[in-house]
Amino acid sequence: MIDIRPFGTLGGANHGWLKARHHFSFAGYHDAARMNWGKLRVWNDDEIAAGTGFDPHPHRDMEIVTYVREGAITHRDNMGNEGRTEAGDVQIMSAGTGVVHSEYNLEPETTKIFQIWIIPDRRGVKPNWGAKQFPKERREAGFEVLASGRPQDAGSGALPLNVDGAVLAATLKAGQTLRQGLEPGRAAYLVPAKGAVTVNGKALDARDGAGIVDEAVMEITASEDAELVLVEVAAE
């Protein structure tokens, strides 16, 4: 089954400094049919104005992955971590027993991110933060694992997650096809950051979402040059 969620149907809010669209229920947006996709709980499509951002606030017991689409985001937290993550790169935060952090756009232009929250397998673990560069040329016509807690990704160089799941990315030129397997009991959620594709024959435009279960293989063909982000988790 493939559940296409067009960008125009997503929830959202415009706070002036922040334009947010929500693939799943979040903050003031509630849709009982869009609470999660397996262990994937949040996928926010955020545009953050220059010189603004999220003031210090707490989290706990959540795996939070930030994929930067354009611009850069600067992180600070009460563990002493600080870092700047640029377009195409990724930062992770395992909130665990609790962390207070801020995320600011200190750039002269709008920063655009996907913020992804995954429910952890274990609660009450030690908090962790990390960021890493992932050159896009390494993911042409094939998914690269950016962050993962899946056993098969141990030693891959992916950022660590406290969950049996993964965040992956790929780029496709128009006309290229890639095939990605999906094991029974697993769920995938695919969003093109840019471009347009078909997934097993179903059309998906930029920033649309596709929830995928019970498909042994995902055949993804680019209708135009595309940049893809995929989350794969337990389907429970």
Image (cartoon, helix red, strand yellow):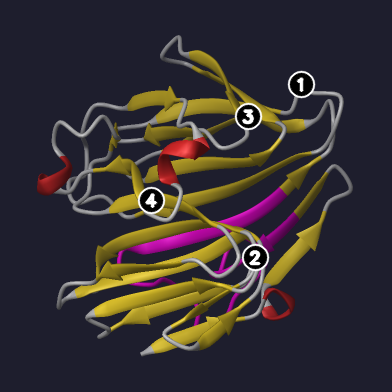
Secondary structure under tag 2 reads loop
Of the image marks 4 and 1, the number of the one nearer the N terminus: 1
Secondary structure under tag 3 reads strand
Of the image marks 2 and 4, the number of the one nearer the N terminus: 4
Q: Which residue is mark 4?
A: 168
Categorize mark 3 by other alpha carbons within 10 Å: few (<14), some (14-19), many (20+).
many
Q: Which residue is mark 1?
A: 106
Which of 198 and 154 lies nearest the eye of the viewer?
198
Categorize mark 4 by other alpha carbons within 10 Å: few (<14), some (14-19), many (20+).
many
Of the image marks 4 and 3, the number of the one nearer the N terminus: 3
Which of 16 and 183 lies nearest the eye of the viewer?
183
Q: Amino acid at mark 2?
A: Arg
Highlighted magenta segment, given as a residue range: 20-46
Disc number lying in front (4 or 1)? 4
Spot the residue most to the front.
Answer: 175
Secondary structure under tag 1 reads loop
Relative vertical location of residue 55 with respect to residue 124 in this rendering, above or below: above
Q: Which residue is mark 2?
A: 207
Q: Position of residue 86 (x, y in %)?
A: 61, 28
Secondary structure under tag 4 reads strand
Q: Amino acid at mark 3?
A: Glu
Q: Residue at x 53, y 26 (%)?
A: 101
Q: Which residue is mark 3?
A: 103
